[in-house]
């Protein structure tokens, strides 16, 4: 039994697991909106125009995206809370600022700033979804929510 507890405490997220979560967060964020004009935001927005027709495919896209956002936001909120989310955003923001200071990123256009912000949001969501696994890996403690049956 002790061996199983040790295995549970030391198992958890891997670099590949985090990258998969980051990829899923990037897909969710960038399919929802991106500055290229090819996103659900733009597609659904054109379907709401005076001559356009809102169809079931638009409603399906809204439902799938809403479910994805619900999963990522709920997991991030439960894992990090308000304070942890602010700290994660602060760290990602400071890293972006550092990249600007080293002239790796440029902020001379609105699309560049938009892309940077969207990627930063995806990173915070990926950290939030991964945090319980990271916490277990770092501390060996498993966080369990109390549920009344």
Image: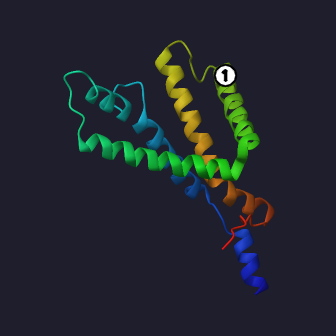
Say which quarter of the image contains residue 100: top right
Residue at 72% in and 41% down = 82
Residue 71 point in image, percent of width and height: 53, 52
Q: Is residue 95 left or right of residue 37?
A: right
Q: In the rendered image of this protein, does residue 127 appear above or below residue 105?
A: below
Say which quarter of the image contains residue 41: top left
Instruction: Please tell me which residue lies in front, 147 or 45.
Output: 147
Residue 123 point in image, percent of width and height: 59, 41
Residue at 46% in and 19% down = 111
For the N terminus, the image quarter is bottom right
Q: Is the residue marked by circle 1 packed among few (<14), some (14-19), or many (20+) residues within 10 Å?
A: few
Residue 42 point in image, percent of width and height: 34, 28
Residue for badge 1: 102
Q: In the rendered image of this protein, does residue 13 appear above or below residue 63?
A: below
Mark 1 falls on what kind of element?
loop
Q: Is residue 10 left or right of residue 42?
A: right
Say whether residue 49 is visible.
Answer: yes
Say whether residue 23 is visible.
Answer: no
Residue at 21% in and 27% down = 52
Q: Residue furthest front?
A: 149
Q: Is residue 43 left or right of residue 116?
A: left
Q: In the rendered image of this protein, does residue 122 appear above or below residue 41?
A: below
């Amino acid at each position: 039994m002790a061996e199983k507890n040790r295995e549970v405490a030391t198992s958890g997220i891997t670099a590949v697991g985090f990258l998969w979560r980051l990829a899923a967060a990037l897909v969710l964020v960038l399919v929802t909106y991106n500055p290229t004009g090819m996103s659900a935001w733009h597609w659904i927005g054109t379907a709401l125009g005076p001559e356009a027709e809102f169809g079931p495919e638009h409603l399906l896209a809204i439902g799938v995206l809403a479910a994805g956002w619900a999963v990522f936001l709920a997991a991030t909120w439960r894992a990090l809370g308000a304070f942890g989310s602010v700290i994660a955003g602060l760290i990602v923001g400071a890293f972006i600022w550092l990249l600007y200071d080293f002239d790796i990123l440029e902020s001379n256009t609105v699309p560049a700033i938009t892309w940077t912000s969207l990627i930063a949001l995806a990173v915070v969501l990926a950290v939030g979804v991964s945090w319980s696994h990271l916490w277990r890996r770092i501390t060996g403690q498993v966080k369990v929510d109390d549920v009344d049956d």
